[in-house]
Amino acid sequence: MFLRRLRTSAALRRSATDGGVLATLRAEIAHELSSSAPSVPPPFHCQDAPDFVTESDAPHAQDLLLRRRADSEEVLVSALLAPLVFEGQEPLPRDLLMKVFVSKPGGTPVLHFDCRAFSAEGKPGGADCAINAVRYHSSPGDDVEDKYEGPEFRDLDPRLKAALQEYLVARGINTNLASSILLHLYQKERVQYLNWLKTMEETFMKGR
């Protein structure tokens, strides 16, 4: 009993030393594990977009790079979760940021679309995808600060905006693809978060 009391006192002193960080980390790890978080990020797969192949999806990276090749053109998609935004104390659903590049054989010219996908109301698991900006590059890497890049997308004629949206849909950039990417990056980030928590736990354990 006395020995146990000494151990308890030592544990309390250690907890006071780290400000309760270790105990909080362990509680968070237990919570994440109770949600059945996978230990390895699952490979990306979209049943409705079989033409897209994964070019890059490193376990420690936050982005996903997909490519779709056809005889007449190539479509490259770079996707990343938008920064976390809070409403009061509650986090809002994350949006998906996508850069879509469409090029002809030889790599030039390049059409560059900045898109944003967000959870669609009334569509469980669905995500609406909207174009935020469209640019034209005569060659890869020709971004020049003073180059005219056209008007803001929101200021374009509604018929042109609709036509550009259909242009992307015809190339596989649609709700199904956006939903699959969004789910994959959510799962990937959860695994990364759990691994980070475990690394932090080990770091604080070494100081004991």
Image (cartoon, grey):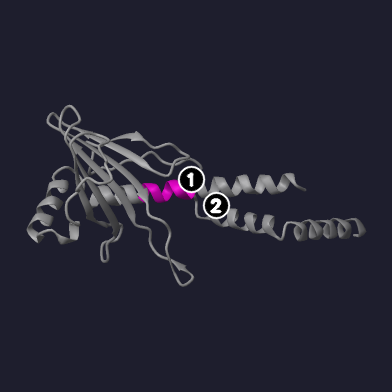
Q: Which mark is residue 142?
A: none
Q: Quadrant of residue 120?
A: bottom left
Q: Residue at x 77, y 48 (%)?
A: 208
Residue 179's spot in the image, x, y percent?
29, 52
Q: Quadrant of residue 95?
A: bottom left
Residue 14 counted in the magenta span: no
Q: Is residue 39 above or below residue 158?
A: above
Residue 201's spot in the image, x, y percent?
65, 48
Residue 1's spot in the image, x, y percent?
90, 60
Q: Is residue 68 above or below residue 118?
A: above
Q: Secondary structure at mark 1?
A: loop
Q: Alpha-carbon neighbours of circle 1 within 10 Å: few (<14), some, or many (≥20)?
A: some
State the residue position of label 2: 33
Q: Mainly helix, strand or loop, the magenta region?
A: helix
Residue located farthest toward the front when viewing the structure as drawn: 146
Q: Secondary structure at mark 2?
A: helix
Q: Residue at x 28, y 54 (%)?
A: 116
- Describe residue 69's horizontal placement relative to residue 55 as left or right: left
Residue located farthest toward the bottom when viewing the structure as drawn: 88
Q: Is residue 199 above or below residue 123?
A: above
Q: Where does the magenta region start and end?
A: 183-190
- Describe residue 21's horizontal placement relative to residue 35 as left or right: right
Residue 182's spot in the image, x, y percent?
34, 51
Q: Quadrant of residue 51?
A: top left
- Is residue 174 visible in the rendered structure shown here? no
Q: What amino acid type should be assigned to the residue bearing mark 1?
A: Pro
Q: Nearer the viewer, residue 204 or 83?
A: 83
State the residue position of label 1: 38
Q: Residue at x 27, y 66 (%)?
A: 121
Q: What amino acid type should be assigned to the residue bearing mark 2?
A: Leu
